Image: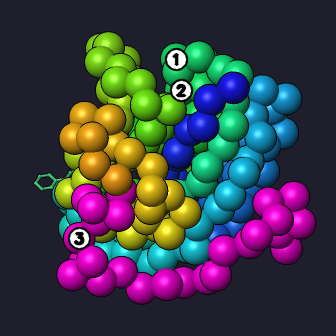
């Protein structure tokens, strides 16, 4: 069993409903248990800016899945929620990224973990710091609380749910 942190985001349709549906879809796998969910934040698009604002959230799961099997499940959940891969960095109903997989460092052509640019992105680091301030990012050896830039401002959209099975 390994503790994994996922970053989820979306900016098309009912954004909050899609985040919650994605978390429910993940939790429905017997190999995945959702442990905690950060508050949801509304964030300005980064990378390709001419698109709607995102909602972003980070989730802690425990899983018995190997990293590539978890990646495949994430992609399957994205597809179930009608993600269409169109414009690079463009709008999407849901994006599910593996941020941290225990303290593993993974570098394959399919998957790089820790997520290589996560520490630069407030839409990842602010919610991650809410649920994992003492978790160590294994490339730097630093805690999330030491890596988060608290000068970055992102706007809280909704509080967290303490009991993942009982949200809504
Ligand atoms: C220069 C070049 C500077 C590229 C930044 C940053 C590219 C982030 C892609 C970049 C660059 C990304 C989300 C988002 C995306 C999201 C918010 C990406 C991939 N996903 N903006 N932009 N939330 N707020 O989930 O992260 S596209
Ligand atoms: Mg992403
Ligand atoms: Mg992705």
Badge 3 is on which residue? 149
> Which residue is at 27% across, 41% downward?
141
Secondary structure at badge 2 equals helix
Task: Give the magenta-colored segment's residue range.
Answer: 144-168
Left/right of residue 111 with respect to residue 167 in the rendered view = left
Badge 1 is on which residue? 68
Badge 2 residue CB within 8 Å of ligand 3: no
Q: CA distance from mark 3 to mark 1?
A: 30 Å
Above/below status of 7 relative to 77 = below
Residue 103 x %, y %: 43, 31
Can you tell which of label 3 and label 1 is closer to the viewer? 3
Q: Are marks 3 and 2 in contact (CB under 8 Å)?
A: no
Residue 71's disc is 2
> Which residue is at 49% across, 32% downward?
101
Q: Earlier in the sequence, mark 3 or mark 2?
A: 2
> Which residue is at 58% across, 67% downward?
38
Left/right of residue 162 with respect to residue 147 in the rendered view = right
Residue 102 x %, y %: 50, 32
Q: Considering depth in this image, is 24 or 93 the residue closer to the camera?
A: 24
**Which image quarter has ligand 1?**
bottom left
Q: Considering depth in this image, is 165 or 48 the residue closer to the camera?
A: 165
Q: Is residue 72 visible?
A: no
Q: CA distance from mark 1 to mark 2?
A: 5 Å
Q: Are marks 1 and 2 in contact (CB under 8 Å)?
A: yes
Residue 10 x %, y %: 49, 60
Q: Estimate how packed mark 3 is, as few (under 14), some (14 to 19) or many (20 or more) residues with alpha carbons within 10 Å.
A: some
Q: Are marks 3 and 1 in contact (CB under 8 Å)?
A: no
Looking at the figure, which quarter contains the N terminus? Answer: top right
Left/right of residue 74 with respect to residue 95 in the rendered view = right
């Amino acid at each position: 069993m390994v503790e994994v942190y996922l970053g989820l985001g979306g900016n098309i349709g009912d954004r909050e409903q899609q985040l919650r549906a994605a978390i429910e879809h993940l939790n429905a796998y017997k190999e995945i248990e959702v442990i905690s969910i950060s508050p949801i934040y509304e964030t300005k698009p980064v990378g390709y800016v001419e698109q709607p604002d995102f909602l972003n959230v980070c989730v802690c799961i425990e899983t018995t899945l190997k990293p590539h099997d978890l990646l495949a499940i994430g992609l399957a959940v994205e597809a179930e929620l009608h993600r269409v891969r169109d414009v690079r960095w463009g709008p999407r109903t849901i994006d599910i990224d593996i941020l941290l997989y225990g303290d593993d460092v993974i570098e394959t052509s399919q998957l790089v973990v820790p997520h290589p640019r996560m520490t630069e992105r407030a839409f990842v680091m602010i919610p991650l710091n809410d649920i994992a301030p003492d978790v160590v990012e294994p490339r730097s050896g630093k805690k999330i609380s030491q890596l988060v830039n608290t000068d970055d401002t992102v706007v809280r959209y909704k509080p967290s749910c303490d009991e993942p099975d009982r949200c809504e």
